[in-house]
Image (cartoon, rainbow, N blue to C red):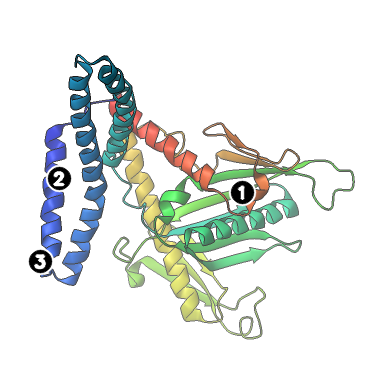
Amino acid sequence: MTPISPDRIRAIEARRDELSALMATGDLPGDRFVAVSKEYAELEPVAAAASEVRRLRQEAESLAFMAEDGDEELRAMAAEELHANKAALDAAHHRLALALLPRDAADERAAMLEIRAGTGGDEAALFAGDLFRMYQRFAEGQGWRVELISSSSSDAGGFKEVVASVTGQGVFAKLKFESGVHRVQRVPATEAGGRIHTSAATVAVLPEAEEVDVKIDEARDLRIDVYRSSGPGGQSVNTTDSAVRITHLPTGLVVIQQDEKSQHKNKAKALKVLRTRLYEAERERLASERSGTRKAMVGSGDRSERIRTYNFPQGRVTDHRINLTLHRLPEILEGEMGELTGALIAEDEAERLASLEG
């Protein structure tokens, strides 16, 4: 592992202490206090990891001195503790290196979750519904909130398409590796011959944009059309011009929203989706410029890539990017995704550490 500059660590600790003193004064205006608190929260894990490295190094020096003592029993004890100290010091160095990795500015944002049925007809729509429920249950376990933005149901159940907003702490950081093609292998309920069918659904997870992230001139950049909703939803939905179609003229992006009875609410939701998609497009452009031709295995963001298979006959889930297979399919579909998301985050961190050292 590449040595970490002591000067860099001292600068981080000094800045952490400066921010702590600023917050302690109680004189900061609200917006300034929020900014200072955020910076402090980012630096504190680095400073804490550095402090642990320093403590373990001092402990190692003391143990090394003891290991040279004339008492044989004391030397043996010191040698044993030195072995444990080395393992702890290696782990602390790793935590410090992870804490120093550049952070994705979008990690703490809410996310827009989009699931679309792919190949497989009704079975694909049912699978899209299974995936949506899986993410809903995972979100509940994380203390997040899921708000349905729009949906198109299949006659046989499930969704042809469903879009939802997921809000809470660290949403995008834990869900961003879910983007891609999810494949299911199972025997459909309508299959009399017991044959296994393969279907697919596409998942996209986008960090939600705020108004300050994407500047839109409604008068010049948007064409907004209103019309009568064509879907189900009660007596007033289909008898008023409540549906909204927004076209972003500079890019040609089109967003349609008709789930709400209120034209105003449909427009607000459509603008939220539009801002998020424009923000993601800009993120992808900047990431492409920074990385050149290099494409990370886990976080490529290629939503045409098959990333995971859910095999019902064998009760297994396989993530193809990291060659991880878990024989816990029922539990995972019930939202117990922690092992999956944790492994993907760890792999991404390992890749980024390797790229810095390479």
Which residue is under mark 3?
25
Q: Position of residue 349 (x, y in %)?
A: 38, 37
- As rendered, which of 178 and 60 lies closer to the eye? 60
Instruction: Read off the residue under disc 1.
Output: 332
Q: Is residue 33 above or below residue 43?
A: below
Q: From the image, which quarter does the N terminus lie in?
A: top left
Give the Cα separation between the discs numbered 2 and 3.
Answer: 19 Å
Q: Which mark is residue 13?
A: 2
- Identify the residue at image location x=35%, y=34%: 352
Residue 172 in sight here:
yes
Q: Residues within 10 Å of mark 1 (few under 14, many from 20)?
A: many
Please report contact status of discs 1 and 2: CB closer than 8 Å, yes or no.
Answer: no
Please tell me whether mark 3 or mark 1 is closer to you in this view. Answer: 3
Near-viewer residue (144 or 305): 144
- The reply to whether residue 303 is visible in this rendering is no
In the image, residue 140 lies at what x, y percent?
53, 62
Q: Secondary structure at mark 2?
A: helix
Dot in front, 1 or 2: 2
The amino acid marked with disc number 3 is: Thr
> Going by the image, does 273 lie left or right of 121?
left
Give the mark count: 3
> In this rendering, would 153 be left or right of 306?
right
Question: Dot 2 surroundings within 10 Å: few (below 14), some, or many (20 or more)?
Answer: some
